[in-house]
Image: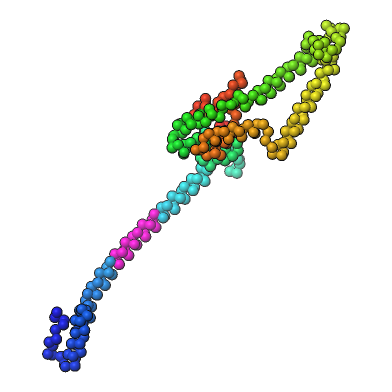
Amino acid sequence: PQSCSLADPQTKPVTMLRRRLRLHRGCRTGLAPAKRLAPVRASATVGEAAELREMVKTLLEDRQELRKQVGDLTQNMKVLMDDFERKEGGIDRTLIKREGFVGGSQARLAFRAKGNMIQPAHVSEMGHEALALLAMQGNHCAHRERLLREIMDVDKCTWEEAHVVLAEMDQYEEQFYWLESMPYRLGISGGFLAAVGSYVMVFNKPVAAWYAVNIVNEDLPVNLADLTINQVGTWTWAWMEPMIGTASFILLCAQFGRAQLAKMNMKPYTEYLLHFRADRVAKRFPAYDRSMVRAWAKHVPPVKWNFFPDYSRNRSLRGPSSGL
């Protein structure tokens, strides 16, 4: 190359010698002279500076856009928080001053609720948190709605389709309903018959005379035909009082014993029955949350006037009245 030429007649011998040595070393190592590399480095530096300036400009534009988005987000969050505070629980709590009210602005009747109130009319319109709080208070409709939502989440179905599974669970739960409710039905029937029978045996003259002769072996009064109802009661009370008094004392002792069981946190028959029903259903449908299934199953269907149960599956989709 031209940079490695040794011909230079215009330089002095010493200078020529030094220059030749430097050129010779540069040719041996394959490096160009320093004065040849300087223009290349300058041009590279100018290009990098332009690229950096363009990058800084882009970053500044992105920073401005980001600050704008953060400002919009902050404003939106402020609006949402204000709206949430006013509509906590789904109710618009904004108050409006009544027109023409006389009595001072601090009076309770000076303000009324805003007209556009959004209130849930059924438990199905409530949020998850409010529904859970209502379920913790023992509301069966809340337990039912929570189980429906659990079925929807597990089976990936709609609210209407979840009622099909709920009806199947209800049918399985009530398989032994008549056997489980038999003690209560016998108690109701026995109590009614005992109430009517005690009145008849105390105040009814023919029944009292038959019972006195055949059971008590009591002699009949001479003037039995002339006795009034109150006189018949006074006569029969001699043998009816021990029986009625003893039965009342037995019931009193049974109530006292049950109260002590409750104080010791022992489960009576009803609690054992409800737990048995809940465990059966939870074991039969293990795909769903056990606590939700058991909470829903701890419920006995209401009974109509003819002593037949009103099953949940026979009601509409909204189920029994939720009390809202």
Residue at 59% x, 39% y: name it: 136
The reply to whether residue 65 is visible in this rendering is: yes
Give the overall secondary structure of the magenta segment: helix
Where does the C terminus fall, quadrant-wise? top right
Judge by depth and name the residue closer to the eye, 103 or 265. Answer: 265
**The residue stretch that appears in magenta:** 52-69
The reply to whether residue 140 is visible in this rendering is: no
| Colouring style | rainbow
The quarter of the picture where residue 210 lies is top right
Judge by depth and name the residue closer to the eye, 41 or 120. Answer: 41
Direction right: furthest residue: 222
The quarter of the picture where residue 139 lies is top right
Q: Can you say whether 104 is above or below 252 in the image?
A: below
Count numbered badges in the picture: 0
Judge by depth and name the residue closer to the eye, 249 or 53. Answer: 249
Spot occupied by residue 46 in the image (x, y as percentages of width and height): 25, 71
Spot occupied by residue 51 in the image (x, y as percentages of width and height): 28, 66
Is residue 245 found left or right of 149 in the rendered image?
A: right
